[in-house]
Amino acid sequence: MRFGGLLTLIFVCSVDTQNIGKFWHISDHHLDPYYNAEGQNPIDVCPSSYGRESANPGPLGDYNCDSPWELIKSSVHAMKRLHANPDFIIWTGDDTLHTSDQDKYLGPEKVLEIIGNITAVITEVFPDSRVFPAMGNHDYHPKNQIPPGGSVIVSALAGMWEHWLTKDAYITFRQEGYYKDTVPGSENHIMMVLNSNYWYNSNKAVDGTGDPGLQFRWMKLSLESARVNNQKVFIVGHISPGYFELVSNFRMLWYYSEFNNRFISIVREFDDVIAGMFFGHHHTDTFKIVKDTKGNVISSMLLAPGVTPWATTLPGVVDGANNPGIRLVEYDKDTMMLTDYVQYYLNLDEANQQSEVDPASLWKEEYRATQKYGIPDVTTTSLNSIAKAMREGCESKDSVCPTSFNNYHVLNTVSYNKDPCDENCQKYHLCAIMEVEENGYNSCMDNWGSDAIRPTAHLSGIFMGLIVYANIV
Ligand SMILES: *[C@@H]1O[C@H](CO)[C@@H](O)[C@H](O)[C@H]1NC(C)=O
Ligand SMILES: [Zn+2]
Ligand SMILES: [Zn+2]
């Protein structure tokens, strides 16, 4: 018996029993069909520039503009070249251009046409892949104002995406813009796709109270049923709870306050069931940690960067552009544990110079999460260890510190902004990463710099840092 036990142990340790799957996470394509790089005047290259000058517009885009069609097309063909047979694709929304004059450049038909264009290219390039689209706040006209209970646009989207939806998913999507299904290739597990726009504080079709579209009720019932059936759940949506890490001058919770609290309390109740959460909307590469009421880290979300390079016009953001990104996530198909992801990107400036080359071949690996951050996987524990290391600083100035703040900061804009992240910048990022709740966030922002929150340089030895950190969370 003892011998048999030993053999079993050797077997378990030496054979790779993980059954690794891969899926694409793409987001925020924001097609600007009016983009014209040949434009005479630098302020007329695209309506999405809001009158800002496009210094160097090229065939694949400009950092002050939303995506030209060439960029979107190349991103989908790049996905095919880089990993042609994903288990599935999650697509977290926002397809139309940002513009100061919505009614001039957009309307219900134009919004549907743009989403239809992107749906068509994804379907054409990935005819055999299941795609899980989530509605973004720019997938409606007027933007953000998605009413509970159904609408012409949401019905039309259900029709447009019917080939990706099961019958049940089609029915709930058509009514409320959310749905669930089993995970292709991991049929014992659940994909839950949210209509996070119902909780968005810019959506005036809801008032921030109650349960729009009964989505919270549906979430809870679905998570309860998953728990009973021993299923794990991936949660997919456009807008995440918590804060935007680039905004400096006001404290903006994306969701209505009551909805933010409700979402977090559901995550706390079902942290054992939720295997991963995936969002877009920021256009940046970041993540968020969820803690229980005692401050213990219990869950996390991965935010994938956008395809659009568009520099945000949000007040308080200095240079909010990014390089276009697409992300391949790796997971254990049996347990749904997140094992890694690879971030691919297009260096837009360089790509615009290479007009002779197929642009799909210019998308390159930016980094692999486990390698770049020196973590074993991309689970909550590992993501939290990145945040912890960023908070406590690097040990040695000479050695490459994979978790140093500037390392993360460059990745945050998909290797667009290489400026160092100063103390204020670090505060905005880390408070948004560590605190998805109002009280915790305000206290993080207010107390930043005091030793209790962030040890000063001489205290940042690993053990001191750990002790200080352990005392405050
Ligand atoms: C987008 O869709 C419209 C309507 O189907 C079509 O006329 C147009 O050519 C499409 N644009 C692109 C870039 O595919
Ligand atoms: Zn967006
Ligand atoms: Zn958005």
Image: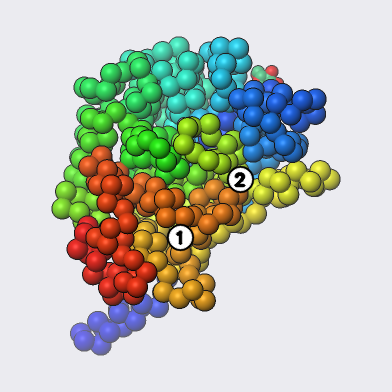
At horizontal 69% and vertical 22% (from top left) the residue drawn is 34
In depth, the one of 82 and 353 nearer the eye is 353
In depth, the one of 230 and 426 nearer the eye is 426
Q: Residues within 10 Å of mark 2 (few under 14, many from 20)?
A: many
In depth, the one of 368 and 201 nearer the eye is 201
* N-terminal label among 2 and 1: 2
- Residue 220 vs 149, above or below: the answer is below
Q: Quadrant of residue 17?
A: bottom left
Q: Quadrant of the C terminus?
A: bottom left
Mark 1 is on which residue type? Phe
Q: Which residue is mark 1?
A: 405
Drawn side of residue 189 relative to residue 117, left or right: left
Q: Secondary structure at mark 1?
A: helix
Mark carried by residue 52: none
Q: Position of residue 454 (x, y in %)?
A: 31, 60
Q: Nearer the viewer, mark 2 or mark 1?
A: 1
At horizontal 68% and vertical 31% (from top left) the residue drawn is 53
Q: Which residue is mark 2?
A: 323
Q: Quadrant of residue 437?
A: top left
At horizontal 49% and vertical 25% (from top left) the residue drawn is 138
Q: Position of residue 174 (x, y in %)?
A: 40, 20
At horizontal 62% and vertical 31% (from top left) the residue drawn is 66
Farthest-out residue, left: 294
Q: Quadrant of the N terminus?
A: bottom left
